[in-house]
Image: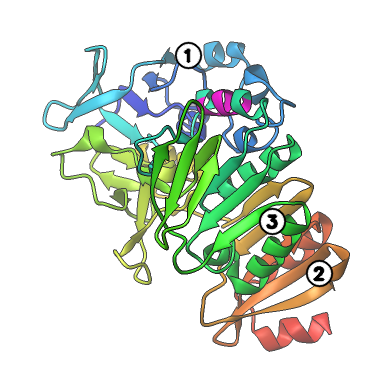
């Protein structure tokens, strides 16, 4: 492995920042540049759809580190200059400003972009801090809100909008919110809970969105596949994300799912990848690769990518942990809840708004979800991979 003197980290989010800090903690004393597309220093994304939308936090509250930290790291932090190209032969990253950054080692941590709901009327999408601030301003006027998508982000936005006093409708072609993440049983409980809070759901066949059309000043019409039209003062798209790897076009590093990498987060010689843009091999996924868009995963991969760029040879150890705050509901989960499995409540009671459930498939516990039960989740989260018979015997 050739010696590294200059490392460029592209992406100034949690994964990129963790990679930078890990490089220094691991003893790298060469030159490091952190290149970010946004004008803001590294900030935490999970609060954007929760406390920032509710007005409980502002831009300064979500910064991941104080400004002085970057002086300690002795890194060049370049903001508001998205990467637009990579020359692998010359080993150079090119920024939108025309800045050319030569490197011996590269960490790709550019994350994802929001998948767009078709227009032509304006649709708000939530990915960046500026997106969140703009959406918060819209919610201040309490518009009739249609949220397209019933995944974690869609439900978090819907809950925040409802707390701000908006009429809210969630539209999704699936039959239960967050079914892909937590299974049908928990999905149905989520729907019922949000309906009690006043959120209306339009789900199932015929509720895909054909497009969003203008209907007068400040108004839009959301047209569904069954011909229904929903009037809205605000439309929020939350239908997933696409890897932000357009700047790598023609380099041989990209796949439709993301930037493929091995279990050590290495994509090629001297090039590592971390965070939401990283695509690791998964034989069970339709395309053979899978991205994990969880906050903790970004930090775990950022650390792994940096260490292996330096030649440490460490496999990624992923906790698989995720969480979602939806109003006064906190969900915490590890593992998966496959369609062919079943969900069993092992502690608490859904009727009491507090429980822990496990996902079981092939006689094995493959997932754990806690509903307003943080302390109990700590006890149960380590049961994934164990025989279901043993785990359920303890529960009974």
The location of residue 102, given as percent across then percent down, is: 23, 20
Earlier residue among tags 3 and 1: 1
What's the distance in space between the residues labelled 3 and 1, CA to CA?
A: 36 Å
Nearest the viewer among 354 and 165 is 165
Q: Residue at x 56, y 60 (%)?
A: 202
Q: What SS does tag 1 mark?
A: loop
**Disc 3 target residue:** 332
Give, as a single range, the part of the protein colored magenta.
Answer: 131-136
Q: Residue at x 16, y 33 (%)?
A: 88
What's the distance in space between the residues labelled 1 and 2, CA to CA?
A: 51 Å
The location of residue 205, given as percent across then percent down, is: 46, 69
**Disc 2 target residue:** 350
Q: Residues within 10 Å of mark 1 (few under 14, many from 20)?
A: some
Q: Main secondary structure of the magenta part?
A: helix
Q: Nearer the viewer, mark 2 or mark 3?
A: 2
Say left or right for 133 vs 124. Answer: right
**Disc 1 target residue:** 74
């Amino acid at each position: 492995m050739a010696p590294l003197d200059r490392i460029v980290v592209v992406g100034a989010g949690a994964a990129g920042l963790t990679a930078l800090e890990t490089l220094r903690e691991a003893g790298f004393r060469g030159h490091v540049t952190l290149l970010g597309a946004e004008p803001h220093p590294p900030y935490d994304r999970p609060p954007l759809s929760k406390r920032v939308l509710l007005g409980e936090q502002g831009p300064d509250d979500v910064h991941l580190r104080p400004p002085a930290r970057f002086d300690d790291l002795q890194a060049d932090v370049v903001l508001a200059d998205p990467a637009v190209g990579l020359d692998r032969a010359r080993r150079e990253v090119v920024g939108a400003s025309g800045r050319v950054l030569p490197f011996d080692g590269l960490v790709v941590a550019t994350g994802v972009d929001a998948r767009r709901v078709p227009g032509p009327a304006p649709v708000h999408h939530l990915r960046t801090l500026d997106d969140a601030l703009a959406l918060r301003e819209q919610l201040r006027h309490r518009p009739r809100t249609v949220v397209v998508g019933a995944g974690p982000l869609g439900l978090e936005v819907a809950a925040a909008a409802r707390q701000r006093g908006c009429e809210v409708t969630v539209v999704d072609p699936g039959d239960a919110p967050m079914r892909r993440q937590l299974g049908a049983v928990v999905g149905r409980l989520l729907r019922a809970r949000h309906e009690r809070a006043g959120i209306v759901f339009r789900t199932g066949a015929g509720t895909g969105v054909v497009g969003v059309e203008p209907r007068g000043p400040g108004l839009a019409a959301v047209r569904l596949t069954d011909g229904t039209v929903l009037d809205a003062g605000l439309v929020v798209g939350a239908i997933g994300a696409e890897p932000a790897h357009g700047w790598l076009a023609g380099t041989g590093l990209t796949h439709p799912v993301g930037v493929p990498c091995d279990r050590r987060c290495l994509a090629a010689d001297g090039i590592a990848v971390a965070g939401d843009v990283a695509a690791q091999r998964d034989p069970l996924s339709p395309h053979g690769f899978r991205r994990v868009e969880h906050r903790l995963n970004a930090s775990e991969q950022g650390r792994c990518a940096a260490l292996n760029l330096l030649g440490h040879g460490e496999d990624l150890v992923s906790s698989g942990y995720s969480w979602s705050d939806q109003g006064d509901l906190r969900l915490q989960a590890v593992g998966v809840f496959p369609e062919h499995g079943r969900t069993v409540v092992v502690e608490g009671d859904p009727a009491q708004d507090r429980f822990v459930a496990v996902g079981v498939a092939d006689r094995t516990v493959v997932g754990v979800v806690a509903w307003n039960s943080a302390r109990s989740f700590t006890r149960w989260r380590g049961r994934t991979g164990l025989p279901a018979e043993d785990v359920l015997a303890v529960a009974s």
